[in-house]
Image: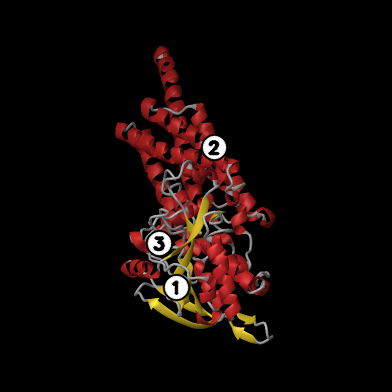
Amino acid sequence: MVFEHRAIRCRAVGFLCRVRTAALATAALLALPSAMVAQESLPEDSATAAAPAPARSSLPGETLSVHLLTIGPGDRVEELFGHNALLIRDSATGYEAAFNYGLFDPGASGFMWNFFRGRMMYRVAPLALDPMLASYRAAGRRVWAQELDLEPAARVELLNLLETASLPENSQYRYEYFLNNCSTKLRDVLDVVFDGQLRAATDTPGSDERISWRYNTRRLTATKLHYYAGIDLLLGPRGDEGTTAWQQMWVPMKLRDTAGGLQITRTDGSRTRLVSSEEVWVDSARENEPAASRSMELLFLFFGTALAVVFVILGRHTAAGSSGGRAMLSLAGFLWGGFCFVAGALLVAMHWTDHEFMYWNRNFLVFSPLGLGVALGLFRTAREGTTGPWGRRSALGSVGLLILALLLYLIPATRQDNLAMIAFALPIHLAVCWVMLVIHKMDHTLIYAAAVKPRRLRRG
């Protein structure tokens, strides 16, 4: 998965996948690509060093071992969601392959257009283990290896499934950052081998309703505030749906933790732990991912208030006749209004894509295309020292839409967890509206004074 879809450079394909998260022109909008695709390079031979599969007769299940590899978060935004792979070894033949889902070719025809539309095709391939571990070691990322206690027949079945999935005619699949990513593909193939036991044990509503798609996305992006904000901006109401433990395994570390605590029933009726042993193959001094999502509303309110103060100061300088104040107010208005316009237009455009988690996004009310009118209104202020009616109406309309967004947030049945976005935008919209009205009032005062003064002179 905004949401780690890692891209490994190799001969057959370009890169391994990332999420999230956020696949934008500004800091928020630039998070869109990061929420969906990440690019991470590994050595060129990472795809070719995997030992060729021997004949089926030479792969008795007794000599096979299966490890679930989980790679912890890294420094870059595309690494924040972690990654995973299934490693299969045969001690008798030397066969070794790490099966990684989410490979894609960025040079493919129409890739970027399909990426924007949410219609990305990814694939699975067996990669070599050693170059992967070397890359993660160099990046200071921790790698956990959990040996899965499968029966011999189940190991052979798993290998057959993965090798069949890796065939050229089968390797591609439709990628979705929450529902069908590199981690959920591993989850699903393991569930097939366990005859549905994994899903039966985890696909039930949990007691903690806070665990939504957005919750885990926020938790994993909390150290990168601009990407946190961008992905949070793009996620619509569906991102606030409660998730089961089964659904939460879109996060590789959740799959690791769930597997570590799961018991399965063998064919003879006995119960055993799914994970027989767990080791850290690559250690790191890096801290693990945050255990819980932090509340950011006060921080966003602080940033929004700070920007609102800037608008108020520039408005006062403009009202005092400062040409520098006019220029700076025009620039600030262009940046803010332009951001609102682009963000609002993008949120509307998402309805013509397959990014279903972005549909009916209430942040359209917070950052609306009315920002274009605000930007043009403040540009007129810089040029003429006055405001136009459309600029004032756009500013008032922006405040009205934001108040509507706040009211919808307060209604549980219509709630989208966008309070942080509201807290950020509200003081700025109010400040811009205040500046527009103050300058407009000043214009009327000057016009009235100019009209009254000749009358007094005539009376004298």
**Residue closest to the eye, 384 or 401:** 401
Whether residues under marks 3 and 2 lie with C-beta atoms below 8 angstroms apart, the answer is no
Compute the Cα span from label 1 to label 2. Answer: 68 Å
Q: Residues within 10 Å of mark 1 (few under 14, many from 20)?
A: some
Taking 415 as reference, is 68 left or right?
left
Identify the mark nearer the N-term, 1 or 2: 1
Relative height, residue 46 to residue 458 (above, below) = below
In the image as oriented, which residue stretches furthest toward the top?
458
Identify the mark nearer the N-term, 3 or 1: 3
Identify the mark nearer the N-term, 3 or 2: 3
Q: What is the number of the mark on residue 328?
A: none
**Residue closest to the eye, 379 or 104:** 104
Which image quarter: residue 181? bottom right
Q: Residues within 10 Å of mark 2 (few under 14, many from 20)?
A: many
Q: Secondary structure at mark 3?
A: loop
Amino acid type, residue under disc 1 in the picture? Tyr
Query: Residue sitting at 57 percent across and 74 percent down?
Result: 156
Relative height, residue 136 to residue 237 (above, below) = below
Whether residues under marks 3 and 1 lie with C-beta atoms below 8 angstroms apart, the answer is no
Tell me residue 432's x, y (percent).
46, 40
Compute the Cα span from label 3 to label 1. Answer: 14 Å
Q: What is the number of the mark on residue 95?
A: 1
Q: Which residue is mark 2?
A: 396
Q: Which residue is mark 3?
A: 47
